[in-house]
Amino acid sequence: MNRRHPMLAAAALLVLSVTAGGASVSAQDELLKVFGAYATQIEEPWDGVIHTALNAEAEAGLIEYTFADDIGYSGDMELVLREVAELEAPDIIFGDAFGNEEAVRAVAADYPDIAFVFGSGGGPADPNFSVFDNWIHEPAYLAGMLAGGLTESGIIGVVGGIPVPEVNRITNAFIMGAQAVNPEVEAKVSFINSWFDPAAAKEAALAQIDAGADVLYAERFGVIEAAQEQGKIAVGNMSDQSGLAPDTVVTSVTWNMTPTAQYIIDQVAGGTYTAQDLKDFSMVGKGGAALAPINTDLVPADLLETVMAKEAEIVSGLFRVDINEGTPTGSVIPE
């Protein structure tokens, strides 16, 4: 069912309500009410992953789920959150606080009975503000190994959104993986200073291709299109993006929010929710991160075997991918 929250209509924010079945998350008579607050459009992979996980829980009949997307970074996030808290009083609000950190935390402090669960570079805050992030540096390293083994020019490219720690660590992991296979690999890194600007991302990717890059990590949406047009190889990000260009995308670095969502839903339903850092639920060990299926038509058998062996070491805990959140050396960052 599509509908608009009355006080959000003026801001032209789409709100979707999804419920299904008669199942309950506990012995409660009513389903938990969950709201998603997204700064970007849900087509943008980062917020899209959160939305996909919550939508699946709703379709399974475990929660009632509504959301607003494309809220932006100009002050509307605080307005939306306060209106939803007052009008809807959801049990849980999920979202991304990047670019709206102070506003989100201020609202959470004023509504201690609502569980606020937000993507954030900061820490949790008692009693109700939990944080998570996309800790996908492990599959990024594996994808880098593929890139290092597949490049013919010796040049790989990464097009990222904004050089914040969360993006830097997967970029650096990708480069480390490539250089583990081929120490001579050169990495070109460009940031577009936006979380969702496909045209700018495509332009940056085309510039890297012109400079010799033949395998590109599409940290932002728009890169895969450039790779496809130029006959290059691409690595998707956040979700399995092979469907965008099956003959171009060799694999994707994927984030799965389902373990995080299910844990929080169970905590709130059971009355045991506390503010916490949910980092572990977004890593390989708990199923929160993975390398998507590899296009074996593009990958030699020996390289595939090497990458799969390293993946097994990560899963077993025998190998840990170093975390480097510094801006990659030589990055191109627009003013």
Image (tube, rainbow, N blue to C red):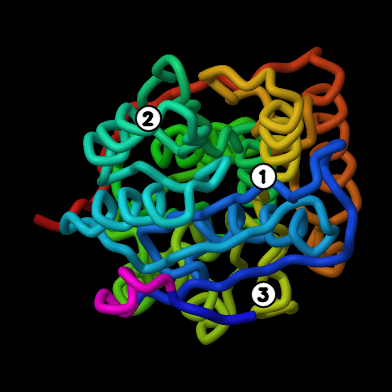
Marks counted in the figure total 3
Spatial CA distance of label 1 from label 2 is 17 Å
Instruction: Assess whether residue 97 is covered by the magenta stretch.
Output: no
The amino acid marked with disc number 1 is Met
> Which residue was labeled with disc 3?
248
Q: Callout 1 environment at 10 Å: few (<14), some (14 to 19), or many (20+)?
A: many
Viewport quadrant of the N terminus: bottom right
Q: Which residue is more in the foreground, 20 or 88?
A: 88
Q: Is residue 302 left or right of residue 110?
A: right
Instruction: Assess whether residue 8 is covered by the magenta stretch.
Output: yes
Q: Tag 1's secondary structure?
A: loop
Against 59, residue 291 (above or below) is above
* Residue 294 sits in quarter: bottom right
Asked if the residue under mark 3 is in contact with the one under mark 1, i.e. CB atoms within 8 Å, the reply is no
Viewport quadrant of the C terminus: bottom left
x and y percentages locating residue 220 in the rendered image: 44, 61
Q: Earlier in the sequence, mark 1 or mark 2?
A: 2
Q: Magenta region: which residues?
A: 5-12
Q: Tag 3's secondary structure?
A: loop
Q: Which circle, 1 or 3, is nearer the viewer?
A: 1
> Which residue was labeled with disc 1?
257
> Which residue was labeled with disc 2?
121
